[in-house]
Amino acid sequence: MEKIICSLCEKPASVNLQYAAKHLCSGCFVKYFEKRFLRTIREFSMIKPHEKIAVGLSGGKDSVVMLHLLAKLRRRLPFEIFAITIDEGIKNYRNTTIHIAKRECKKLGIALKVIIFKEDIGFNLDEIMKKTNSSACSWCGVFRRYLLNKYARIENANKIAIGHNLDDVAQTVLMNIMRNEPIRIARFLEPITNDEYFIPRVHPLLRTPEKEIAIYAMLKDIQIKYMECPYAHFSFRQHVKKQLNDSEEKYPSTKIRILNSFLEMKKHLRKWMKDEKFKLFHCKKCGESSSAQICMRCEMIMKLKNMA
Ligand code: SF4
Ligand code: ZN
Ligand code: ZN
């Protein structure tokens, strides 16, 4: 069989980037991957010198690889990093990823804060699932976002770095379209209105396909465990993920096109929302910023207490 040669040098290729019509050897792939990461940070001015960045570290491959890339970037750009891991209390799953988060932070000399659902919310996710019949992710997502924001602010972080990759972003955009949620699309990735209580989020992997993160981790010997949250299987996201992977297979670049069209659409939606005088409140119960008088987190806790 004929050997495929790297599109950028003479070495045998080991990675096929179908959307870019390129075959790369492992060395060129690593450079390409790291350059795209830096370019994305620059494109959206994600990190400025001397800022303090809270890394949302779940212990999964995306956030661990992002932690390594940010730690490397810190050698060139003066900024601070620390990590926050949220322990939702998911049996036979979260303990393993927390162990990975601790190990990687220790390796890189990065401080880590583990925030426990039960201590703030009063329930862990397994308990919530025993009480309710609804999707775990809708409860978990609200509480995780709330806790990340709160503890990043307590630690005086300027930004929160989230390890969402290109696949995650394309899925979220499609999910919001399929659910007819234009406001969520406009708000996705950045808030409409600035608020001192809200710590802006940055997504340095938003142009990076999920598959490539796994390849990069393998080539750089970043030890990762492939585990899936036991609740993920039942989510709407899984359904959209399958459809999107199928489309990408048949029509390469689908995910990148969704991302680019989202970025374009967002500009117009945000303008429209500013005209609509979109208002932010401070929750009457917990004081955090919210799009209503009582935030989703407090509404959900009340619901859970009433179910007891
Ligand atoms: Fe939470 Fe859903 Fe993610 Fe599991 S998959 S950690 S339930 S958001
Ligand atoms: Zn090469
Ligand atoms: Zn609240």
Image: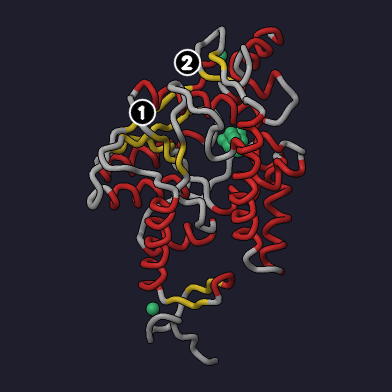
The residue that appears at 66% across and 46% down in the rendered structure is 173
Mark 2: secondary structure: helix
Q: Nearer the viewer, residue 115 or 195?
A: 195
Q: Which residue is mark 1?
A: 113
Q: Note whether 132 is above or below 212 in the view shown.
A: above
Q: Nearer the viewer, residue 128 or 198?
A: 198
Q: Is mark 2 within 8 Å of ligand 3?
A: no
The residue that appears at 40% across and 48% down in the rendered structure is 66
User: Quick one: label 2, few (<14), some, or many (20+) residues within 10 Å?
Assistant: few
Q: Quadrant of ligand 1?
A: top right
- Please provide percent x and percent y for residue 162: 47, 41
The residue that appears at 49% across and 73% down in the rendered structure is 15
Number of numbered discs present?
2
Q: Is mark 1 within 8 Å of ligand 1?
A: no
**Mark 1–mark 2 contact, CB under 8 Å?**
no
Seen as rendered, the residue at the extreme front is 275
- Please provide percent x and percent y for residue 26: 40, 72
Q: Which residue is mark 2?
A: 119
Amino acid carrying label 2: it is Glu
Image quadrant in which the N terminus is located: bottom right
Left/right placement of residue 127 relative to residue 85 reads right
Amino acid carrying label 1: it is Lys
- Please provide percent x and percent y for residue 208: 50, 57
> Quadrant of the rendered structure where residue 51 is?
top left
Image quadrant in which the C terminus is located: top right
> Quadrant of the rendered structure where residue 261 is?
bottom right
Q: Note whether 302 is above or below 158 in the view shown.
A: above
User: Quick one: label 1, few (<14), some, or many (20+) residues within 10 Å?
Assistant: some
Q: Note whether 142 is above or below 50 in the view shown.
A: above
Spatial CA span between label 1 and label 2: 14 Å
- Please provide percent x and percent y for residue 102: 35, 37
Mark 1: secondary structure: strand
